[in-house]
Image: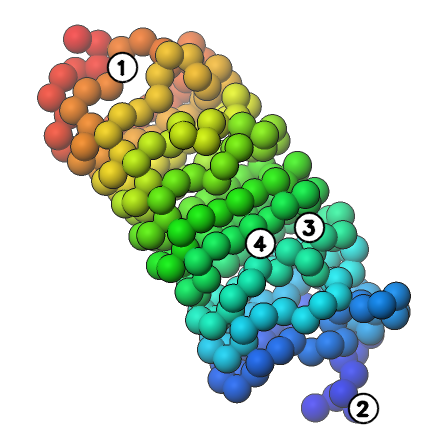
Amino acid sequence: MFPRGKLPITLKVLRIDGCEKLESLPKGILMNNGDAYQVPQLKRLNILSCPCLKSFPSGQLPNAFKWLYIENCKQLESPPQRMLQYCTELEGISIYGGDMKSLSFEDMHGPTSLWIRNCDGLESVSLSISNLKELYISNCRNLKSLPDKMHDLTSLVRLYISNCPGIKCILDSGLPSNLTRLQIYGCIGIESIPGDGLFPNLIDLEIVDYQGIESIPARGFPSNLRSLIIGCKNLKKPMYE
């Protein structure tokens, strides 16, 4: 334990791992009610295997904070949006495991990369992140659809979706036209793929393990497509037939 419960002012990386009885984060990492930061240089926070952690305290992380990683915090109920709201240099958020039913990151500038993985209870995701460039969603078995208004994520260039059987269509919410890389693996509920020139800037397209797809549109792929990977075992027609 640090003297008087304070963390070192020079601390840049904090990892909290396997604290089975921890219910809240150290208050010193957040600024609240205008108080000065105790750890103004903190850049990365990793929280792993803290089964009693239910929510995050009020307050904000330093503006220059860059990375938040959360893994297997099963009782965590609310996403940490409030403490990240003014992190202008935020590069990434990774959430792995947990039983939360919804995730919401609204009216945020960052992160540039968002990873959501192995969240079996997750049913919905809401995003409004102006600088988001990469979105990865995998092994979220109860997720019914992609986030609403994805076409408003104008900075998004890469979308990766894997093993989300509840997703039936990838176009319900609209996808941004600036996408350059679209990868979809093992989403068995999807029965059709986009075409008709919906992604004019697409360079790489990977579609693997689509059990419901029997044909692929011969037209509509962008002219500058450089890489196309198709792996659909029930495909009956060649692409250009």
Horizontal relation, residue 8 to residue 125: left or right: right
Rendered residue at 66%/38% (across/down): 131
Q: How many residues crowd mark 4 within 10 Å: few (<14), some (14–19), many (20+)?
A: many
Task: Estimate how packed mark 1 is, as few (under 14), some (14 to 19) or many (20 or more) residues with alpha carbons within 10 Å.
Answer: some
In the image, which disc is placed on residue 4? 2
Q: Amino acid at mark 3?
A: Leu
Contact? badges 4 and 3 (CB < 8 Å): yes
Compared to residue 224, the image places residue 45 above or below, namely below
Amino acid type shown at disc 1? Pro
Q: SS at mark 4?
A: strand
Q: Position of residue 72 (x, y in %)?
A: 45, 69
State the CA–CA distance, disc 3 to disc 1: 39 Å
Give the vertical position of 111 relative to 212 (above or below). below
- Asked if residue 237 lies left or right of residue 222, the reply is left
Looking at marks 4 and 2 on the same chain, the residue that comes earlier in the sequence is marked by 2
Residue matched to label 4: 93
Quarter the N terminus occupies: bottom right
> Visible in this render: residue 99?
yes
The residue that label 1 is drawn on is 217
Rounded to the nearest angstrom, the CA distance separating label 1 from label 4 is: 35 Å
Residue 231 location, quadrant: top left
Q: Nearer the viewer, residue 56 or 39?
A: 56
Q: Position of residue 29 (x, y in %)?
A: 74, 71
- Residue type at tag 2: Arg
- The amino acid type found where label 4 is placed reads Ile
Residue 71, percent from left and from top = 48, 66
Residue receiving disc 3: 90
Q: CA distance from mark 4 to mark 3?
A: 8 Å
Looking at the image, residue 50 sits to the left or right of residue 222; the answer is right
- Residue at 80% across / 90% down in the picture? 4
Query: Separation of disc 1 and disc 2 at Cα?
Result: 66 Å
